[in-house]
Amino acid sequence: MSSGTARVAHPGAWVPTSYLAEGIPFAMVIWVAGTMFKDLGHSDSEITLSTASVGIMWSLKPLYAGFLDMLKTKKFWVLSMEFAMAVLFGLVALSLSLPNYFTMIILLLWLIAFASATQDICVDGVYITSLDKARQAAWIGWQGAFWNAGRIFATALVVGIAGTLQRSGSDPKTAWAIALAVSVATMAGLGIYHYFKLPTGSVPARPESGGQVMRTFLDQWVDFLRKPHIWMMLLFVFLYRSGEGFLLVEAPLFMQAGMHKGGLGLCATASVTAECPHMLADKAWIDGLISTAASLAFGIAGGAFVAKFTLKRTIVIMALCMNIPHACFLYLSHAVTPEAPLSLTTIATLVTIEKAGYSFGFVANMLYMMQQISPGKYHMTHYAFCTSLMNLVLIPTQMASGPLADWMGYKTFFLFVLIASIPSIIAAWLAPFPNAAAPAEGGGVAKH
């Protein structure tokens, strides 16, 4: 594969598309797969236990991030993973026709998650090593916005196509296979585009022997663990998403659940019924487009807020903004009854408020990792360490969310989520700032 030209292309030619390519597979694995399985009749417990386990792949970055630079260029890995994911999404679509499609698709999601995690490491590496600090700050808003655009693509377009095709009379599995084909074409198209436009990123000195490879690998870990206040900083990174992890997969499933199961009933495919008073396409519109668009705006606002008042002074406020809006789902679960479905306006408003608060507060997490933990001679590798730990808390919380919701019922479950958010706020209060003088890295929304 081409290693690119010596002259780096303008960031506008590759930053938006690179982070769009990052956002699509994450959204497909975390949100779209769950929506599809729910539509095909699987329980919340079965869905969350299976799909959440896939998230482990995003937490394995520290085990191999440092080796990627030693073997090939960052661009090579980005292109390889984008084309691999196009093929894997195609195999997911084909697997829907098999009797054991659920097991086959979960196995393919593991491979997609590994490819996505590898792509994440190297796209971030290209960004960090191809742009100076001023340009990093200037383009972080575009980075986050287009990562979230990947979620809009997946949860609005792909889910919307599946729902619309079913409403037109298509078999559910056929509808989902056609919708997934859109992601195949998109990832392949992005790979072709990045072949021509993506910079190579810095190419470090290659190790001369296996011993040097291991010495470099060990030095990356030693240097990371020697950072001042590292354990308290890592505790903050791990706990900051503790409450949100319970909502990440389960909240969309609650929206899609039938009325007599305590859900909001956005599950109709052919026509509305008493059990499903709203269309599945409405869920794509609300959860995929409206709330994600609000997330973009409030994420940018959160970045501007931190840039103006500094992360150290605002971190507790950001934690409160991220977690208090979880109460919106608590209200929805208590307000809906089988005899009185909620209007789409009410659902859209409260879901959007929750997503907006989350996006406003989430900026603090990414900036803390970028400014306080990862700077140093292994910036890309240490940033990958941080993001993998950040994602690690999502695995047990997502896996537990379905069984807990099935056991407690949605009303009690969302009260539990509010209580589970308390450690996030405490961690923000106790977070150390060894690099307190570091300026805010721009006013944009960070990718999730």
Image (cartoon, rainbow, N blue to C red):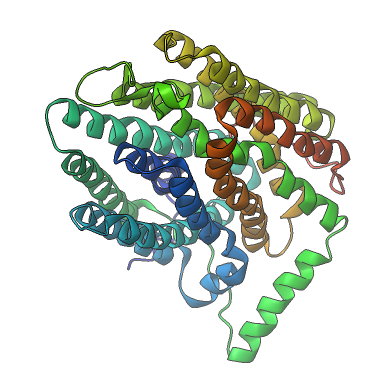
Q: From this viewpoint, is residue 446 visible?
A: no
At 57% from the left and 67% from the top, the residue drawn is 65
Q: Position of residue 246 (x, y in %)?
A: 60, 39
Q: Is residue 257 left or right of residue 176?
A: right
Q: Which residue is drawn at 34% across and 30% down?
A: 156
Q: Quadrant of the N terminus?
A: bottom left
Residue 80: % across, % down: 35, 64
In this view, the residue in front, 102 or 312, is 102
Q: Is residue 199 visible?
A: yes
**In the image, 445: left or right of 8?**
right
State the residue lying farthest toward the left: 169
Q: Which of 379 and 221 is in front in this view?
A: 221
Q: What residue lies at 74% left-to-right and 60% top-to-bottom? A: 376
Asked if residue 95 is positioned above or below residue 217 in the image, the reply reads above
**Residue 279 placement: quadrant:** top left
Tell me the quadrant of the picture where the C terminus can be found: top right
Where in the figure is residue 102, as x and y percent of width and height?
32, 55
Residue visible at 40% across and 53% down in the picture: 198
In the rendered view, tell whether residue 196 sits above or below residue 427: below
Residue 74 versus residue 431: which sits nearer the camera? 431
Position of residue 310 measured from the top left corner of the image (x, y, whole percent): 79, 30
